[in-house]
Image (cartoon, rainbow, N blue to C red):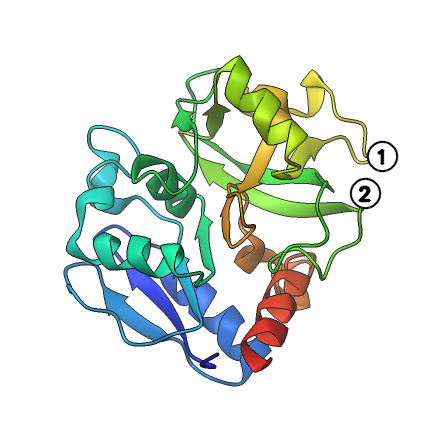
Amino acid sequence: MTADAAVIVFPGSNCDRDVAVSLAAATGRKPLMVWHGDATLPKVGLIVLPGGFSYGDYLRGGAIASTSPIIREVKARAAAGVPVLGICNGFQILTECGLLPGVLMRNAKLRFICRDVHLRVERADTLFTRGWRQGQVVRLPIAHNEGNYFVDDDTLARLEGERRIAVRYAAPDGTVNAGANPNGACANIAGVVNETGTVLGLMPHPERLADPLLGGSDGTPVFAALAQMLAA
């Protein structure tokens, strides 16, 4: 596997550099910054769709970005097994382009939310989450207007049965309840993986708490896990 990672940059991305800094700190290599309008993608071992407000969230978050030329290549690489991480707006793009099920709707109280939340780790055996422990509670920031993850009942049952829910919003003690749900997401879902565990959509921002100077390092294990994968 190539040691290079690629960060896809859309008009309106605002966490692309944050992700690049975290990846470089973990891997010792600067990731490739790939413009959304490019139709080709160099051979890489990881693709990241960063947070932000691609195309100003016109229509809905991620809708226009999901039609960008580079997304065809992202989907082809994902189908070939290349890991893909979508953070916040990147998660929205992953659902819009069909790489993950469901949709991210307006927050339940129809307000933008920007604050730290607690998450309970449901899967500590994926390429992205193996730096955490099963059942561990971590603190990460959220900053979104459309983080209300929704799937129908049958899809939710399938996600539960196939253990595809990676993290859930939780209280600091790990209790999953409505009070710990910041945006109305069904089953408190904050992150899901695809059938093979190689695509992760994650609403909170690990790159925003990946250095003690930022006020915490609960996001660091995500990038350490990705560095380990790229070095394998």
Q: In the image, which disc is placed on residue 116?
A: none
Residue 70 in which image quadrant = bottom left
Q: Is 38 on the left or on the right of 102, as rendered?
A: left
Q: Is residue 76 above or below residue 166?
A: below
Question: Looking at this view, is 215 or 189 the one in front?
Answer: 189
Q: Amino acid at mark 2?
A: Gly
Q: Is 134 on the left or on the right of 165, as rendered?
A: right
Q: Residue at the location (30% across, 44% down)?
A: 53
Give x and y (percent) for residue 193. 54, 44
Q: Is residue 179 above or below residue 119?
A: above
Label 2 neighbour load within 10 Å: few <14, some 14-19, many 20+: some
Q: Is 60 on the left or on the right of 159, as rendered?
A: left
Q: Is residue 140 above or below residue 40?
A: above
> Which residue does the numbered mark 2 point to in the structure image?
135
Give x and y (percent) for residue 216. 69, 58
Q: Residue at the location (23% across, 40% down)?
A: 56
Residue 219 in which image quadrant = bottom right
| Residue 191 appears in the rendering | yes
Q: Is 79 on the left or on the right of 34, as rendered?
A: right
Q: Amino acid at mark 1?
A: Asp
Q: CA distance from mark 2 to mark 1?
A: 10 Å
Q: Residue at the location (55% across, 39% down)?
A: 192
Question: Looking at this view, is 53 or 149 the one in front?
Answer: 149
Label 1 neighbour load within 10 Å: few <14, some 14-19, many 20+: few
> Which residue does the numbered mark 1 point to in the structure image?
173
Q: Please tell me whether mark 1 sits on a helix, a strand or a loop.
A: loop
* Quadrant location of the C terminus in the rendered image: bottom right
Give x and y (percent) for residue 226. 58, 68
Residue 164 in which image quadrant = top right
| Residue 49 appears in the rendering | no
Question: Looking at this view, is 66 or 54 the one in front?
Answer: 66
